[in-house]
Amino acid sequence: MSIPSLATAPPHAPRQRRKEARPQELIDAALELFAEKGFAATRSEEVAARAGVAKGTLYLYYPSKEELLKAVISQRLSSEIAAVAEYSAQYEGSSASLLTEVFTQWWSRVFDSPTSAVFKLVITEVRNFPEIADFYRHEVVEPATQLVGSILGRGVARGEFRPIDVPSAVLSLVFPMVMLCLHKHSLGACAPAVEMVEPHAFIRQHVQLVLHGLRSDAADATRSRA
């Protein structure tokens, strides 16, 4: 079973397509330019030109560049996290299987898409834009932390995982994934032929490494070796 995505809009009739597709085209163009040049250095007219619309049309949908960046964050990450949270709430399998699906499917999808650039964009720009920092924390960091924490808590409550410090475990799981995306859009972009690791293999190995430490029998195994 695949984790659903909320970011892909349904198809429309040809006559409706252009007008209804404009917000998506503007978001896609903005993400490309923000990733290439940085948020502060990108001008609104550049976004409009890349999307193939007039600058005035851009402002009809997004009154400011800050609102455009918020739209990028909401569509590319917030909606995706909401979809995964809904999927997780209905999941009937083991917590280990759920954690594996969430990380291997969702993070692979994020890494392979332009969405992976959002992390570098936010980390490099938010210090100069406190409003964006607050928005990102509320829309991405908090719900993502709650989502992963709920999966870990589910496993502990069922006896599948050993008792752990859930907030610390969330960071241990998520930070390497963010760093993988940062590498793609920093060193990886400068020297794409020189990869530290195959990204999809890294994601799978990282999840399995963490799961080995989370298993409820891991503590017993550790004590027996002491």
Image (spheres, rainbow, N blue to C red):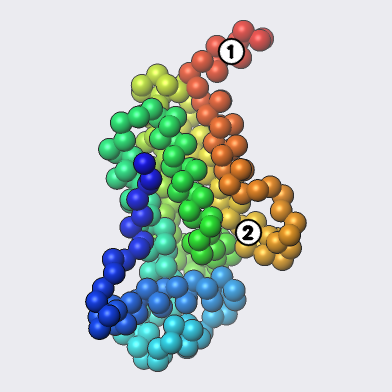
Report x, y in % for residue 167.
47, 36
On-image quarter of the N terminus = top left
Specify the quadrant of the image occupied by residue 37: bottom right
Is 119 positioned to the left or the right of 97 in the image?
Answer: right
User: Is 167 positioned to the left or the right of 13 in the image?
Assistant: right
> Is residue 186 shown to the viewer in this render?
yes
Is 78 on the left-hand or right-hand side of 216?
A: left
Instruction: Give the label on residue 184, or none.
Output: 2
Q: Amino acid at mark 2?
A: Lys
Q: Is residue 61 visible?
A: no
Relative image position of residue 81 (x, y in whole percent): 38, 51
Q: Nearer the viewer, residue 128 or 85?
A: 85
In the rendered image, residue 88, in percent from the top left (x then y), is placed at 33, 40
Q: SS of the residue at dot 1?
A: helix
* CA gap, disc 2 and disc 1: 37 Å
- Which quadrant of the view contains residue 204? top right
Residue at (31% x, 35% y) in the render: 91
What is the crowding at mark 2: few (fewer than 14 residues within 10 Å), some, or many (at least 20)? many
Q: Earlier in the sequence, mark 2 or mark 1?
A: 2
- Residue 99 x/y as whole percent: 44, 36
Residue at horizontal 30%, vertical 31%?
92
SS at circle 2: helix
